Structures are given as C-alpha cells and as structure tokens.
Amino acid sequence: SSSTTTTTATPRRAAGVAARAAAADAAAATDPKKKKVLVPIADGSEEIEAVTVVDVLRRAGAEVVVMSVEDDRNEVVCSRGVRIVADKNVRELAGRGAPSDWDLIAVPGGMPGAERIADHVKFHAVLEKHFRAGKLLAAICAAPAVCFEPKGFLEGFAATAHPAFVDELGGSLLEKEAHAQSRVVVDQHVVTSRGPGTALEWALCLVEQLFGEDKAKEVAGPMVVQPANARLRRNLEWRLDETPAK
C-alpha cells in the first residue's frame, strides 16, 4: 500500500509565526539603526531587477520604499508587462531630499524605465545629493549607463552594465574591457551590475554592503542560493547554454 503525506501548518504554529513576524515588525519600526532604502521604478523598468532587490533587502531587514517616478500614479507597467504598485509617488517624496534620509538608493534597469528615472528632475535632485554625500548608490542593467554615467556619478569609478550599454560607460577601452564581464562591481560607495541574470547577486551584494557578510549569508541560505564554487549542474540537469547530459 502507499500513502500520501500532506504537511500543513498547525493553528498553533501559524499563530507563533504571526506573533514573531509582528514582534519583528514592531522592533524594526522603532529601531533607529534600521537601514532605509529607496528603489525608484517607472514605466519600462525591468521587473526582475526591481522586485529582486526589494525582496532581498526586505529579507535582510531593510526598510525599502518603492517609489514611482510617474507623477500621476503609483502603478507602473514594467518592460515585460508586469504591473507593480509602488509604495510612494515621487511627489510624496519631493521633500525628502536630505542625504541622511536614505542609506541606499538602488536603481533597476530596463528601457525606457531607466531613461524615465534619469529624466525626472525632482528625483535627480535626490540622487545628486545622495551621491555627493558619499552614500551607497547602486544601479543595474541599463541604469549605470543611462542614469549614472551622464550625471558624472561614475567618473573615477569602476563600473559595469548590460552588454548593450557597457560601451556607453566612461573610462578607457582597457578599463571597460576589464570590468565589462564582471557580474557585480563594487567601487567605494557605487555598486553596479549587468542585468536580470545577475540581479540576485547584486541584491545580496547590497545586503553585504549595508549589513555585512554574515547577514548576506543568512539571507542567501533559506533562498537556496548556490555558492559560487558549487557545481553548476548534475549529470542529468539541463542548462540554457548546453544540451542535457546523456
């Protein structure tokens, strides 16, 4: 005979989980050391990059505010048609320009989302003050080239971007070639990455920058993130870049 076992949370366990979550939320709300992160999004932002960085940083305990730069609404339509409703609108945050407001500003890529973020005058003022104060600043995919490079934020910094945009980065050809293949580049307070496929590494790197290596490992563990030195596949697994093993 055979049997099927279905595991469900008992009411007691569910209540315990809810209680711990509520306690953690309450502690976080009153914690003066809680890291504050701003993630701007726009119509055409890359959804994997946007959601990944928000999710991972919240797992680490950061207070993440998702902000729409579309003045008339909080909902944006991302580059692949996914709709995201932001926590705030740029109009609500216009008065929060002081550098001390944010520990990190992380800009997702995607087109034309990166352009729309770069072109927003009010948001640029927040970004400019944040950068000049030497606070942690991050971008991925098209955003390093579209949002940071034209504003001088990458001058003197090593950086990477999506392969389609890496040539738009400043620096010598030798410098570009040295960093173009890097999945995540950290140079002082600027962190850049390449695209949707590197979004998780980028996000975990930001956790490490904000909270330390131990916290990054703590967050990565339950997510079953594969260590960098792990085997890429078993004999019968399939990867996008090769045929199944026989």
Image (cartoon, helix red, strand yellow):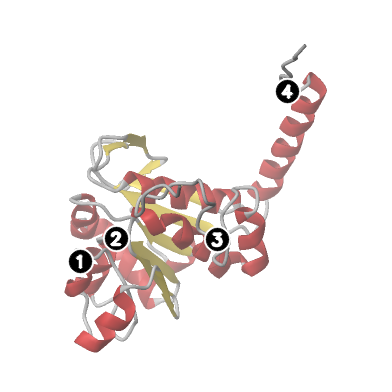
| Marks 4 and 2, how far apart at CA | 40 Å
Name the N-terminal-most of marks 4 and 2. 4
Q: Secondary structure at mark 4?
A: loop
Which residue reaches farthest right? 12
Q: Secondary structure at mark 2?
A: loop
Q: In which quarter of the view is residue 145 placed?
A: bottom left
Please name the residue that numbered disc 4 is placed on: 7
Is residue 150 something one can see in this rendering?
yes
Q: At label 2, which amino acid type do we have?
A: Cys
Q: At label 4, which amino acid type do we have?
A: Thr
Label for residue 165? 1
Q: Residue at x 45, y 72 (%)?
A: 135
Please name the residue that numbered disc 2 is placed on: 141
Name the N-terminal-most of marks 3 and 2. 2
Q: Residue at x 34, y 82 (%)?
A: 157
Q: At label 3, which amino acid type do we have?
A: Arg
Badge nearest the viewer, 3 or 4: 3
Please name the residue that numbered disc 3 is placed on: 231
